[in-house]
Amino acid sequence: MNYQEMNLNIRFDAPEEIWEKVPLIYEQLDGWLGFSTGTAGSQAGIPYWFAFCENEKHVSASAEPSGLQFSALMEDSEWLVWVIRIKEIASRMLGYKVGEIELGEVDY
């Protein structure tokens, strides 16, 4: 497994109607566990997929000034599938193209 990360153009200062939909997006992704209570080496209030322990296969997310930041410990091939899926779901539910600015997928 390898360390993975991405930063999506879902800004921390997006309108409330955008942030209300984000948990609904999370629930549709493989491995969804919920928001951590701070046990098993996880950070309280952070969304997790697959495991709450960051030493195991997991995905977690946090809202940062640059956008919605995801970090993971996962096989490369599985990560690529997971990333494609969240971008598709988020774009459909939020009504705009969601992607990674750093990869040139979307404008800032």
Image: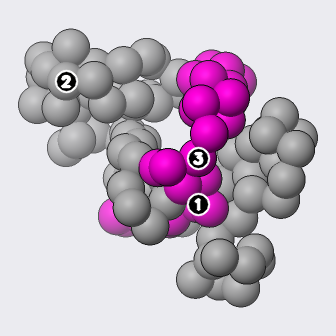
Residue 7 in the image: above or below residue 78:
below
The residue beneath circle 2 is 44
Q: Residues within 10 Å of mark 3 (few under 14, many from 20)?
A: few
The residues tagged by marks 1 and 2 sit, at their Cα atoms, a distance apart of 22 Å
Determine whether, in the image, residue 6 is placed left or right of residue 47. right
Secondary element at tag 3: loop
Report which quarter residue 16 is drawn in: top right
Position in image of residue 4 (x %, y %): 42, 64
Q: Could you tell me how far apart the alpha carbons at marks 2 and 3 are, in whole angstroms?
A: 22 Å
Q: Residue 71's spot in the image, x, y percent?
A: 38, 55
Left or right, 78 with reference to 69? right
Q: Nearer the viewer, mark 2 or mark 3?
A: 3
The answer to whether residue 81 of the structure is visible from this angle is no
Q: Are marks 3 and 1 in contact (CB under 8 Å)?
A: no
Residue 71, above or below 99: above
**Measuring 88% from the left and 44% from the top, which residue is drawn there?**
95
Magenta residues (range): 1-29
> What numbered label is drawn on residue 80?
none
Work out which quarter of the rendered image holds the C terminus and state it.
bottom right
On residue 14, the disc is 3
Q: Is residue 91 magenta?
A: no
Q: Which mark is residue 8?
A: 1
